[in-house]
Every structure is written in C-alpha cells, then in structure tokens.
Image (tube, rainbow, N blue to C red):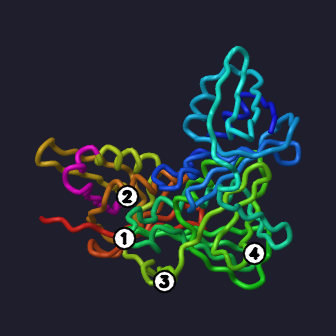
Amino acid sequence: MKVSCLQENLAKGLSIVSRAVSTRSTLPVLGNVLIATDNGRLKLSATNLEIVITCWIGAKVEEEGAITIPARTFGDLVGALPQEQVNLALNERTQTVHISCARTEANIKGIDAQEFPLVPEPDQDNRIRVETDVFKHMITQVAFAAAVDDTRPMLTGVSTLFEEGQVLMAATDGFRLSVRSAQIPSHVGEPIRLTIPARALAELARVINENQEAIYITLPEGRNQIIFDMDNIVLVSQLIDGNFPDYSPIIPKRHNTRAVISTAEFYKACKTAEIFARESSHTARVRIEPGDEINPGYAVVAATSSETGDNVAQIDANVEGDAIEIAFNVKYMTDVLNVIDTPQIALETTSSMEPGVLKPVGDTDFVHVIMPMHFGR
C-alpha cells in the first residue's frame, strides 16, 4: 500500500471512526483502525463489535493494500502533523506503516487486515430513505430518554417502527418516555419493528453530514444488524434482541390542568432549580396556578436543599384547569426542554401522583412523559 492524502482530511476521517474503537477488548485488532485502499479512495474503519464506523476520504493511490494500526497512536500522530500532504507506505513483510509529512517521519507497527472483523455492505436495492435533518432531530429528541444501565438491555435501545410512509421512535428508562414520529420519503410495505441501541444512534447523530440530504437504511438478512449509509460514511450497529415493552398505556389520555409556558423561561427556571436540587435526588416542585379576571396564570418552579439553601422562580403561564403542585426530577425536565425547539411548551397534568406530559405547542409529532416524584409536606 502506498497512498497520500491531506492531513486535515485524514484527521477528520479518524475523528469520525475513532469513537467505534474498542477500549476494553482482549482482541488487540479491535483497538486498531483499518486503513485500506478502495476504488481510488482511502477507507478508514473501526469497530467495538457493537458498532462499526467506516468513512472514505479522497487520496492519491499508488499501490493498493490494507493494514490495521493502533487507533490512538495513529490519531495522536496525525493530529500533531502540519496541514500538508501525508504519505503512507506499508511494508508488508514487517506489517509496519511508514508515515511522512513535511519534515516529520514515523513508523507504526500494525496487525494484518485479515484479522479485522468482516464489515457488511449496504444493500443498494432494499433500503429505506430518511431525510438527514429530520432523522437527526428525531434521535436528539428520543435517544436521551433511553436507560444507560445495562441491567435492562432492552431499555438501552430505541424502539423504531417503519410503517408505510412513517417512522416512529420511542425510548424510556422507566422514569420518562420520549416518543417522536415523522413522515419519510420511502414507502415501507410490511411494518418493520426493531430496537436500535441508543448509543449507536447517538454516534450516528454525531457523524451525520448536515450537507447530506438523505440517509439510506438497510437490514442485512439474518444478521440482526442495521446499516446507515451516508455515501462517504457508513455506520453498522447490532440490534437488541427481544420485544420492547408496550409504552402506549403509559401516555395519559386526559388531563385536568394544561399550562402553556415559554420553553426558554421554563428551561431557565428548571436549570436554576437544579443547582439546589442536586442534594435531594434532583427533586423540584412545579406549582401551576390558573389566573382570574385580574391576574394572569403562572407557574412556580422551586427547589430546596437542607445544605445549601433554596430558590423559587415564577414564570407566566396560560393555564386551563385546576391548580396543582407536582414534583419532578428537574434534571429530566431540563433534558427534555433542551431538545424542544418550539417557543412554547404545554405541560399537561392530572394529579400530583400521576405522570406529567410535555408537548411542544404547534408540533403534534412529539410527546414526552415524565413520572412524578414523591415529596413530603
């Protein structure tokens, strides 16, 4: 193998694939990045056996070849090189890559590319097309609600349903639930229901090229994997086995109180309450008060710490229904408010012991359910 490419392109490619490098594997090759020539371009690939990220960069190929070399060493070296042409030459006998750039030279010992796990190819015929910006937005609004604790593997995933011209995504950790739907350009004949690891979707959102119009999704037969194809970047993820719990009964069908609040003001009030709620399991009280003929309605967000003090923030609200006080995990509240991009949010509540529902005003495609916390009087 003998190739040359620009340092900035190589550095960018390595930053894309590096998050898939395994840090805890007993297999040394999983700590490496695969470098291979591919149809006049340079292919970089990394995997931790849960996800594979591959990207292609422009390069001048003089001799074909492939090798895997330690990802961290190579990434640190490329990052330290000047923004000039980088030359890579493989000595196949010693499995060593010679790297030269301007007045810097280095040699990195590698492992034969044959030892790198086989990466499945995207199917160019049977694939689902989703718009890049819409899909990234869906991931942002849903994946954060998935569980991070592996004791319940199914809840670390995002339930995803492709049906006709729509995709529906949902995630829950048992304390909150995010559900988002969107129209897609593809028409899916038979409904496809699967659970994608939230970590894989978070990585996908990170590497998505905003200039790319569409992402193409394929499901290789019999492999329990999903492939996201973005032309110069391909991400492959294992799917989670089993049935995702039916979350529809969790979403309240009615409410006694509906408060419409400025999203930015509510977020700021919750963020302030979080300072004092840290020591009390992130508990903050939200009190909703309807207005009358003279005074407008309002919401109060309050938090108390026996160690550091307390705070109260009052914000305007358009309230329909009864007054209510309900306690929430304020960190969960700021998490969801952070991914809502409408100017106003509706908080629907039934009682202090039942879940609250957050809906962006003017957007019927998103709903978030948050369980109440118990507090003493």
Residue that carries the numbered disc 1 in the rendered image: 151
What residue is at 59 percent from the left and 62 percent from the top?
362
Q: Residues within 10 Å of mark 4 (few under 14, many from 20)?
A: few
Mark earlier in primary sequence (2, 4): 4
Badge 2 or badge 3: first in the primary sequence: 3
Identify the mark at residue 165; answer none if there is no mark: 4
Residue at 51% over, 83% down: 243
Could you tell me how far apart the alpha carbons at marks 2 and 1 are, in whole angstroms?
A: 20 Å
Q: Earlier in the sequence, mark 2 or mark 1?
A: 1
Residue in the picture at 81% in, 35% down: 2
Callout 1: SS: loop
Mark 3 and mark 4 lie on one chain; the one further toward the N terminus is: 4
The magenta region covers 275-293
Q: Position of residue 251 (x, y in %)?
A: 45, 77
Q: Which mark is residue 246?
A: 3
Compared to 312, does 74 lie above or below?
above
